[in-house]
Structures are given as C-alpha cells and as structure tokens.
Amino acid sequence: MTDKSTDNLLLKPSRPVGIVGYGAYVPRYRLPASEISRIWTGGTGGVPIQEKSVPGPDEDTATMSIEAARNALARAGIDPEEIRAVWVGSESHPYAVKPTSTVVAEALGIVPFTQAGDWEFACKAGTEAMVAAMGFVGSEMAEYALAIGMDTAQGRPGDALEYTASAGGAAFLIGPAEESVAVIESTLSYVTDTPDFFRREYQKYPEHGQRFTGEPAYFKHITSAAQAYLDATDTVAEDYQYAVFHQPNTKFPGRVAAQLGFSQEQIAPGLLVPVIGNTYSGAAIIGLTAILDVAQPGDQVLMVSFGSGAGSDAFGIRVTERLLERRDLAPQTQAYIARRTEIDYATYTRMRGKLVLK
Amino acid sequence: MEIPRHWRLKKQRYALVGEVCPHCEAKIFPPRDVCPECGDEAKTLFEFSGRGEVYSYTTLHNAPAGYQAYAPYTVALVKLEEGPMVTAQLTDIDNQPVEVGMPVEMVTRKLRAEGDDDRGMLVYGYKFRPMELQPLAAAD
Ligand SMILES: [Zn+2]
C-alpha cells in the first residue's frame, strides 16, 4: 500500500443495509479429482481438491440462480414484487445475448417493475452485484435488490482447471439493515489490469496466464483489499469470528488467511472448495452462506472475493438476532453438499456436453 | 416459430402458478379460468407449493426431438398437495427406483432447446425431483 490514508476508501451507504435473505445452491453430482487424474495422468500426481460439483444436463446458471434465489426469498419472507433489481454475476450465462436475470426475475414473480442485468468480472461478478445492490438500497432508491453469483465453470479436458471448475453459487437479498439477518457495515474494492486468466468470445474454455495466477493476481489483490479494509475500519483479524476468501483450490485460501493473520479455524466453516470445487462467481459467497448457517448474533465476518483481470471486494458483515429466526426457513448449504451422487468421467463428459455429436 | 406461445405460458411453466376458485376454493392447474369443480368463473392467481407425490410414471428411452440429451428420462403424473394432477419430467433421480407415492418437489430446469440444440431458444419449465431438501422450519 501507499502511505495514503485509507479512511476515504471505504464504500459505506448513507442508509445502513444488510442481507435480508440468503440462499445457496449446489447441484447434486460430484466428480472426484482422482477420477480426472485416472484419465489424464494414470492416477499419478497430487490433486488440488477432493471432488467437485457438476450440474445435471438440465441445469445452467439461470436454473441454479432460481433455486438459490427461492431460498433467499424464503428466508427473507417479503413480497417479490417489492424487489427493484435482479442482478446475476456469472462467467457462464446461458446466452451470449439475452439476460439470465430476466428469466430469474420472471420465475420468482419479481417482474415487471424491476431492474434486471447480468454482471461480469470473472469470479467477482457476484460480489460486484452485491456492492451495486448495497448502493441501490443504501441510497434509498429501492427497498430491496437481489444479487446473485452463480457459475457452471468449465476447464479444458486434461487442463489443471478441469480438476476444480465446478458449479454452484448463492443469492443475497439486500435490504434495510433493520430487517437484516446480517448487516453489511461497509465494503472496499481493489482493482488493477492484470492478465492472469481470460476467455475470448466464442471460446468454450478459458486461458490462464500461468505466471500471473498466484502471487501477482490472487494473493496481491486479496491481501491488498483485505489489509486496506482492516486499516480503514481500524480492525484486526482477531475482531472477526469468521473469514471467507475466494477459493480456487484448497491451498490458496489457507495461505492468504495466514498472510493476513487469520487462523485456519476462522476460515474452516466457509472453506467449501475441497468438497464442491471452485464455483467461480459463487466461490466466496457460497462460503458466506455456510458461515451464516452456523454464526451467532454479534459475530463479525470478513469476506474477500477475487476475480481475474483482476480485483477483490472486501466486506465487513455483522450477524444480527434476526438470523436465528430466519435461517431454518430454507435448506442449509451443508445439506446441499451432503446430497451427493458420485459420477465417473464418462458420465461427466456426457452431462457437460463435451462429446461432439455432429 | 413458437416463441410467443412460450412467452404466454411462462408464469405457469416457471413457477407452477395456477388459479384458485373464489367460490369453492378449488385449486386449479393448469389455469383455465373456469372451475372444474363448480363450473363458476375462477381467475384468481394461485402459486402452488410445488410439493406433491408421484401418482404414476413411465420411463422414455426413445426421446422425441429436442429431448435426446436427457434420455432416458422419466415422466410422471404428479398429484400436487393442493389437489391437481400435473404431468412433468422427473429430474435428479439418477438410478434411484421411482415409486408410486414417492414425495417430490418442483424445480425449474431447462426443458429443451427450440430447434437447433446450440442455436435455438432455451425453454425453461417445471420438473420434479425427489423431496430431500426440506427446510428445518416452516414460515407461519
Ligand atoms: Zn369452484
């Protein structure tokens, strides 16, 4: 960081806002990393996670967003017609042109008097939508805005990304703080132009600039955003019961937590990547849903996303009493993880459309 | 070109929205504006819970055009907890045996692509999956 004061870097709405309802979604199919290793390396070599979630053939970012959003609305208990924005962050929107968000808004009965838009910023598109929703509600332009981060990520067969690229995500209904299960105190973003990972239009699989994926991208942006947030809010790691970081594999979030002074216990409840894989736009935020499933009123949570390209959004979140009344109104994130059907590589290639039939 | 028809059917197809009869309280699906129980006009929209049970079913191995990607799949007659019967595909069942009386819940999924698989409009709608993800509490 520079020696510039961090005080005015915080994004803090004039009207306090928070999470009125939250919901997760993970599809039921699981591909063990050992199965990918069996096909491509003869089972030799380490694997970055235990297994990843795989969507069924009739699932995509729209259908998965609908289920996560239904869970968020079940916890919120508000009339969908009061929602004025439906924003879906993803790098796997089903259409190149035609919003995912209108399908979601229609299915939830939010149409027609609403904003609807799809957001893109690699894996931080979901938190980008959350920050926008905070502004929308915090400015009193709207009472409620729905922000979703969801992906059905694909890696090229045999590529390192194929072990982890998975499917899932979360939805957050942002509204006034007094109705919230968790207040979002403030947020801060850290963004630079870094060519670590990209996918050109019409290409099915992404490219990763090998030299850029670790230190100059993931670690640099997350630690910079998190440290600036801690400085600006005059807090330290010990002030937080939980922390959740973007999780592309099992090692990175553990290392970034240690660099920032967080213990492995603080990140454990939100660390889902070993058992569901990297859900891209869903990765940090689905970890937050698993934390909210177990947190107690008064607990503080630090969440920091990361998107290639590159940038990070840091959020300080405080759990309220209302969480205890609302959280059992939708299935817990761990219930989705426990619901599990293991598949082999052949079934996976068919489900994910990797077989070219014509 | 069937796009306008899909647009009109969206509400009932995405979220199982039917009608309730203002005279005899019968729940109606699909919506038909006339109550099948008492014959009076019934135009009040009603969103079904999505919960029900399998009444009968059949498994299709030779899928019609647009559905081949999902074959083999099972189509069931589902009795909704509010009364009406709907025909829909079952999903997320893998190799589990389907049984009459099996509790199921509605989900919104891709039904098919219109025309060409890669270029046509995607059609979304309700299917049912085995009920296994119920919340721990119910709203009052
Ligand atoms: Zn009637």
Image (cartoon, rainbow, N blue to C red):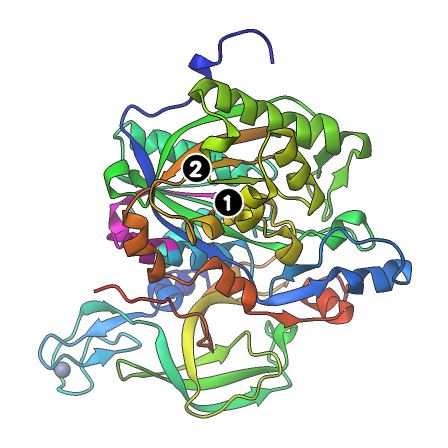
Q: Which residue is mark 1?
A: A285
Q: Chain of mark 2?
A: A
Query: Residue B69: image x %, image y %?
Result: 65, 72
Q: Is residue A281 left or right of residue A110?
A: right
Q: Is residue A254 left or right of residue A320?
A: right
The verdict on residue A306 being magenta is no
Secondary structure of the residue carrying tag 2 is helix
Quarter of the picture holding the C terminus of chain A: bottom right
First in sequence: mark 2 vs mark 1: 2
- Tell me the residue at 56%/45% (across/down): A265
Whether residue A63 is situated above or below residue B61 in the rendered picture: above
**Residue B12 in view (yes/no):** yes
Quadrant location of ligand 1? bottom left
Asked whether A116 or A209 is in front, the reply is A209
Q: Chain of mark 1?
A: A
Q: Is mark 1 within 8 Å of ligand 1?
A: no
Query: Residue A84: image x %, image y %?
Result: 30, 41
Q: Label 2 neighbourhood size at 10 Å, few (<14), some (14-19), many (20+)?
A: many
The residue lying furthest to the left in this view is B23
The verdict on residue A80 being magenta is yes
Whether residues under marks 2 and 1 lie with C-beta atoms below 8 angstroms apart, the answer is yes
Asked whether B29 or A331 is in front, the reply is A331
Q: Is residue B67 left or right of residue B3?
A: right
The label nearer to you, 2 versus 1, is 1
Q: Which residues, given as a range, are shown in magenta?
A: A72-89
Q: Which residue is mark 2?
A: A130
- Tell me the residue at 60%/48% (across/down): A92
Marking on residue A113: none
